[in-house]
Amino acid sequence: MRMERWLSRRNTILLVLVLALWRLYLSATLQLHPDEAYYWLWSRQLDLSYYDHPPMVAYFIRLTTLLAASELGVRLSGTLVVLALSALIWQLALQWWRSVPVAAASVIAFNAYPLSGLGLMAVTPDVPLFLFWFLGVYLLAQIARSGQAWLWYALGLAFGLALLSKYTAVLFAPCLLLYLAGSAQHRWLKTVHPYLALLLALLCFAPVLDWNRRHGWASFEFQLNHGLGGQGLALAGLAQYLGGQLLLVGPVAWLLGLHAALRGLLRRERQTLLLVATTLPVLLFFALTSLRSVAGPNWPAFAYAGFSLLLGHYGLAGASRLRRAAWLAAVLSSLALSALAMLHARGKVLPLEHWAPGLAAADATHAFYGWRELGAELQRVPDVALVITPSHQLSAEIAYYSAGRLAVQTEAGARPSQFNYWRWPARVAGPTGVSAAVYVWIEGEATGPPAGCFAAPTTHRMLAVRRDGVLIRRYHLVTGRLQPPAAPD
């Protein structure tokens, strides 16, 4: 058939490489997102763990910035992970179904996701989690295929590395148990290997446990409150969560993937059971948590690599023209949504300000602009070497875009962050020996320096940053003699 001829190894490689080059171009030309700048700052001060997340994202950034300190260097691991996942998806699809078109359809579906475009371009803890979660799925498939016990220890290592990436990797344990209990692989539960693999994963995670023990379990407490806090039930949170999933994957692809998962589950297809066990429980868990508190749309994103295999098999296995058409519609709609998001991030192709001022103000792609201008403005302020802000993300952006020439810190009353565990900069003198600082805040997000921040403020200036003529952010800069608060504990 025509579609099977097009879905070849050569064409798939070409498409994946073209999308990778486009992703690298965006990585090099977009300024760092505030989250990325914060994780970059972690990579300059490596530790066993951090307040917000385990340390793997910092290690990834540290490695890639050995090649270049630019935005491309910071983000390089995102594109590399997409390429590695594409290779694993291809290999697993070929092993299971011995069909190049099914393998190609699975890889293309994964690369078409908006999540795999702009989402994995930005380097966050989701990048290493994506890699190690699906590596665990791949190794579990090898265990089911070959029956070799030593693979359990490779799986335990992958699980441990996933735990070092993000706490939500802990969901792999119940997913694993669910798969073993509900499939022909339940015989492994009578052996020592799965339990030793879990112990190996826990040993990998031990540095994070040690960091938390030494810091009053602060990171665990923060994430539990952040992810599972809230009181009562709110259907609006669930609707917001489901809408986010439709945008991450593409509406047609998400609905078709769910259909393929449920269909395979009812038919108890061997391969589908593994994919369902490591995908649907994750989506369901965060759907339930969204009833109590807002669940970030990216929180279950790591499960969607397996989703692409469900899509590829459903669409290209067998001779159904309807299923092929559904797969094609899913891929094309996801690719169009991904292209639109990436083009808008780079070239502002959507005139949101003409449709509704509120939409323009809420444009999430503004987060990739306006930080370099602030860094340049601050370096022009005389006699200042320390910047204080009310936000850990703003402080991180200033640290990156001042090229390390300015010491940064968040004020004592700011939202807790890793800054609480770094030493407050010593009294810093500017080029002429004057001890002064700048307090910076974003209009609408704070109101100014707290009382006692300065002995006597001297100047107040503003910097308005525009993107294609549209105001995206207004910074306020107050300069004065430094009178720092007491150092955090």
Image (cartoon, rainbow, N blue to C red):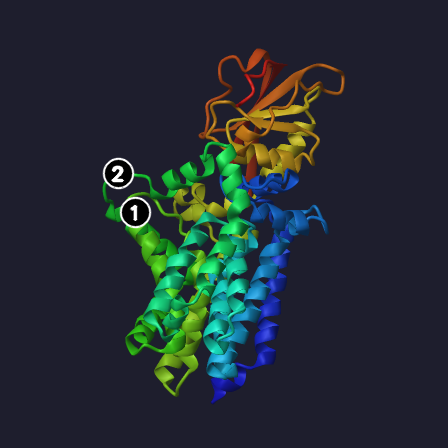
Residue 347 seen anywhere in this rendered image of the structure? no
Foreground label between 1 and 2: 2
* Label 2: few (<14), some (14–19) or many (≥20) C-alpha neighbours in 10 Å: few
Q: Is mark 2 on a helix, strand or loop?
A: loop
Residue extending farthest top: 456
Q: Is 111 located above or below residue 60 in the figure? A: below
Q: Amino acid type of disc 1?
A: Gly
Q: Amino acid type of disc 2?
A: Gln
Q: Is 431 located above or below residue 253 in the figure? A: above
The image quarter in which residue 382 lies:
top right
What is the tally of numbered marks visible in this picture? 2
Residue placed most toward the observer, 223 or 321: 223
Residue ID at (39%, 66%):
189
Residue placed most toward the observer, 175 or 256: 175
Query: Percent x, y for residue 79?
Result: 60, 59
Query: Percent x, y for residue 114?
Result: 47, 60
Residue ID at (50%, 22%):
412
Query: Percent x, y for residue 452?
Result: 52, 12
Residue placed most toward the observer, 145 or 12: 145
Residue extending farthest right: 432
Q: Name the residue under label 1.
A: 237
* Label 1: few (<14), some (14–19) or many (≥20) C-alpha neighbours in 10 Å: many
Which label was assigned to residue 231? Answer: 2
Say left or right for 437 vs 97. right
Q: Is 272 located above or below residue 425 in the figure? A: below
Labelled pair 1, 2 in contact (Cβ < 8 Å): no
Residue ID at (68%, 20%):
428
